Image (cartoon, helix red, strand yellow):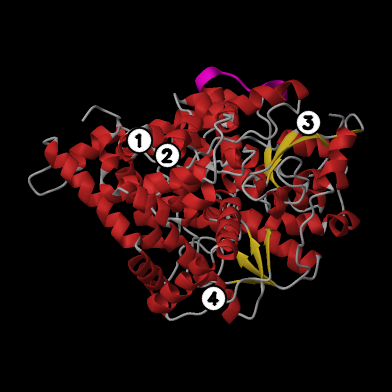
Amino acid sequence: MGIVLDLLKQDVRFHEGLKACMNCGVCTAICPAAEFYDYDPRMLVSIVQSNDEEAIIELLKSDTIWYCGQCMSCKTRCPRNNCPGLVINVLRKISQELGYFTESVKGRQQILIKRNIGDTILKTGYCIHPSIVKPELHPEQGPVWEWVYNNPNDVYERMGGNFDKEGAGTLRKINNEVLGELKAIFEVTGGTLLFDKIEKFSAMKAREAGLEGTDGNIDKYIEKVNAEDKI
Amino acid sequence: MKAEGKRNIWREYQKEIACDHFYYQRSCIRQNFFPASEKTFLKILRDELGKDIYDDPLHTTCTGIGYHTDVVPFDTIQAVVARHFALMTEAGYKNMAISCVTSFGIYSEITETWKEFPEELEKVRKSLKKAIGKEFEVPANIAHASDIIYKFKGEIAEKQQFELINKQTGKPLKIVEHIGCHYSKMFPSKGVGGAEFPHVLSGMIEEWGGEVVDYPERRHCCGFGFRQYMVQSNRGYSLSNSKKKFESMEPYMPDAIVANCPGCNMFLDKWQYTLAEMQGKTYGQNGKGIPVLTYEELAGLVLGYNPWDLGLQMHQIDCEPLLDKMKVPYNPEDKYLGANKKYIGRPEVAACLA
């Protein structure tokens, strides 16, 4: 057995998500991603079930595994109680562990998510914080959000919040001791290692494409990833 | 299927919801975009229902958005959730009340994994001990906050000040209910009414006098898609899914949408604004959008709370058309004031929705 098949089988979610697929295609019929992208979860599960290491590696290098929106509607509908969305989680994890994610346009986006959501978790204790929802990056949030963003202390106080202050309540400041515990959990359980791998493989790709700055920054690479430019 | 048949089927799917003594787990998205809903939830439980619920300053994000965007490993999120169980245990509680549907799905996935793979539970116990020296008990009961409001919908009805009735026509308000996918699509037994006929919101709407709209794309995802929204260039996915729902519900002329999921509440509100800006298309009546409420906002209106205390001014789609139909009083001058009636400016008017 190859390394990818080994890694797949070590993850309990793989056993939970794929018992035996009979290729009926109900998952594809219900899948919102299959309506929007050129995407077919039935085919994806079929490739994984084939145990063909080379074909699975191709999958890990492709855009295909990054199209799923994780709604898990496939789980409800599958007559065999499989969950293609959960199998996707495992494939994405392995793609990042082995560095294959930088081979596809959608996979390369993981560096954007790591630097946005990932870093915010360890910095603030929240996945989303008002400071990262910048109106210029979120025109869809509209003028009401812009008003909230520009007046966070007053608006959150009016809403009964405790913005950026000690104690309980909405958007309270999460203290350094708690953030330290979160960091320790990430270090012991592989969260920090995954962050480091996303950074390392993205930097390698930037270097390979001649997009690394003299001081080692990868800003130009990130710009291209953001714009979905060819790299 | 006839509506009566649907009403009967949900009754097969019941879940146990604790009566009292809850440990509260807040939602990242709701704290940012619907902060007053969490305040209202605590107020209803404590002041209206006389329940005990603990709001712990020491809890954090469950990291669920990080997990479903694949930057947080399963081992890590299990330990973060285990830390919350440890805090709950230390505070002397056994029942979790979870504000977020993504978190609720995460808690369900993790506790079900522990049942099927006990070695995972042992692994988490060891890693949590090693990382921060804490031990924990698995909660006796895990409920989504909407489950708890659903359980006490009758008690809320006894204190009802305003019915979900259009006072201009005398007919029940037509309300779309939208259930977050992770509430019961992954584990149908964890939701009131299961995945096919979730009754958690329709039960509230019917109890308080409204009529539930049954439309073709009722169970379709709002389109959050995690990485499909978080990455700017993928957002078309998210918008397209919400648009599909709006197109499907439009012929039924709903008076409001109520949702139980943080992301769904936000997207169903904000994407209506975006579609109005992009295409000049609105889905509500008289060229306006359809107001989108959280279940706490709906319960708060029913109980006669001030709409601006409920935070309806933080929505991009104005809720005044709904307030007018219900004859809920409000002062337009107070809408955008800060605490102690301080003037803090007003948002620019969205001409596309005016």
**Mark 3 Cα shell of 10 Å, populated few (<14), some (14-19), many (≥20):** some
Q: CA distance from mark 2 to mark 1?
A: 9 Å
User: Is residue B145 toward the left or the right of residue A129 in the image?
Assistant: right
Question: Mark 3 belongs to which amino acid?
Answer: Asp
Question: Mark 1 belongs to which amino acid?
Answer: Leu
SS at mark 4 in the image: helix
Q: Position of residue A191 (x, y in %)?
A: 35, 60
| Mark 4 and mark 1 residues within 8 Å of each other at the beta carbon | no
Question: Mark 4 belongs to which amino acid?
Answer: Ala
Of the two numbered discs 4 and 3 on the same chain, state the one appearing first in sequence.
Answer: 4
Of the two numbered discs 2 and 1 on the same chain, state the one appearing first in sequence.
Answer: 2
Task: Please report, as a chain letter, where disc 1 is located.
Answer: A
Task: Please report, as a chain letter, where disc 2 is located.
Answer: A
| Mark 2 and mark 1 residues within 8 Å of each other at the beta carbon | yes
Could you say which disc has been placed on residue B328 in the image? none
B123 inside magenta stretch: no
Q: CA distance from mark 4 to mark 2?
A: 37 Å
Q: Which residue is mark 3?
A: B214
**Mark 4 Cα shell of 10 Å, populated few (<14), some (14-19), many (≥20):** many
Q: Which residue is mark 1?
A: A59
